[in-house]
Image (cartoon, grey):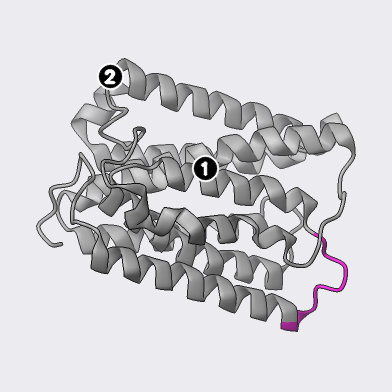
Amino acid sequence: MKKLYEKNELTFALVWIGIYCVLQSLANPLNEQIGIRYSVSAVFCILQAALLFCFLKKNKLLIKYGLCKSSVPIHRFLYYAPLIILATRNFWNGAAINLWVVDTIFYLVCMLCVGFVEEMIFRGFLFNAIAKENVKIAIIISSVTFGFGHLLNLVNGSGVELAENLFQVTGAIAIGFLFVILYYRGGSILPCVITHSLINMTSVFANETGLTMGKRMLFQTIIFVITIGYAIILIKTLPKNQSANVNGKVD
């Protein structure tokens, strides 16, 4: 793994994205065979998260990929208030118990690890690899691929319907854009990992009853306003290029 990373960081990022997508697709039918939802998914995600963290720690790459405290004062991020609001999005229509206890535990563990893995491969590896040449293109590609990656839910047996998946994709692109700005301008990927994990984990308690298309569109509009608005504020107020691994030609 280290040899591949040293040879080509972009290839390294794409290989990890491929591995992640394949394992996620394989996990869903295996979950059904075992009879415990998200059980295999959780195991796969734990293994990937552990492998990634050990690789970064062993090769002294934790700071390079933002697994550290930001040097920018917290008030410059508006105390992360917009992120806190986004983290509550799954409760905007109320809360509900949607899975059995065992299934819920596996889901929470899985989503906790998903937040870390996805942030590292999309915001960490992919963004940094492309940003060496062009930061603007890196921001676009990192955000769009992260969003389009959620199309996988249509074919991996997760049971997500088309309309719901399209909301996931558009929302993921917007949030992906915000997260990459947070990381690039703040120098720390931790706020992204924490918010991402919280959004994923709390989705198991989301109340789908009475969630009409009109409400979905309203909630999605609010998410867009918060994410894009917050990203613009950060772009305008935070210093450029706090990420330890970015030396792109275009700011």
Q: Which residue corresponds to the image point at 69% horizontal and 68% vertical from the top-left?
A: 164
**Is 225 included in the stretch rendered in magenta?**
no
Seen as rendered, the residue at the extreme top is: 58
Q: Quadrant of the image for the N terminus?
A: top left
Question: In x, y percent, where is residue 135?
Answer: 20, 58
Res. 6 image quadrant: top left
Q: Amino acid at mark 2?
A: Asn
97 horizontally vs 89: left or right? right
In the image, residue 161 sits, relative to residue 129, either above or below, namely below
Q: Quadrant of the image for the C terminus?
A: bottom left
- The residue that label 2 is drawn on is 59
Q: Which residues are magenta?
A: 207-214
Q: Which residue corresponds to the image point at 27% horizontal and 28% vertical from the top-left?
A: 4
- Pick the front one: 96 or 61: 96
241 horizontally vs 2: left or right? left
**Is 209 included in the stretch rendered in magenta?**
yes
Q: Amino acid at mark 1?
A: Ile
Q: Can the viewer see residue 13 in this picture? A: yes
193 horizontally vs 220: left or right? left
Using the image, tell me which numbered label, if any, was put on residue 72. none
Q: Which residue corresponds to the image point at 28% horizontal and 31% vertical from the top-left?
A: 63
Seen as rendered, the residue at the extreme front is: 75
Using the image, tell me which numbered label, if any, was put on residue 194. 1
Magenta span dominant secondary structure = loop
Are there few (<14), some (14-19), or many (20+) residues within 10 Å of tag 1? some
Are there few (<14), some (14-19), or many (20+) residues within 10 Å of tag 2? few
> Spatial distance from mark 2 to mark 1, Cα to Cα?
23 Å
Question: In x, y percent, where is residue 28?
Answer: 72, 41
Circle 1 SS class: helix
In the image, residue 225 sits, relative to residue 208, either above or below, namely below
233 horizontally vs 104: left or right? left
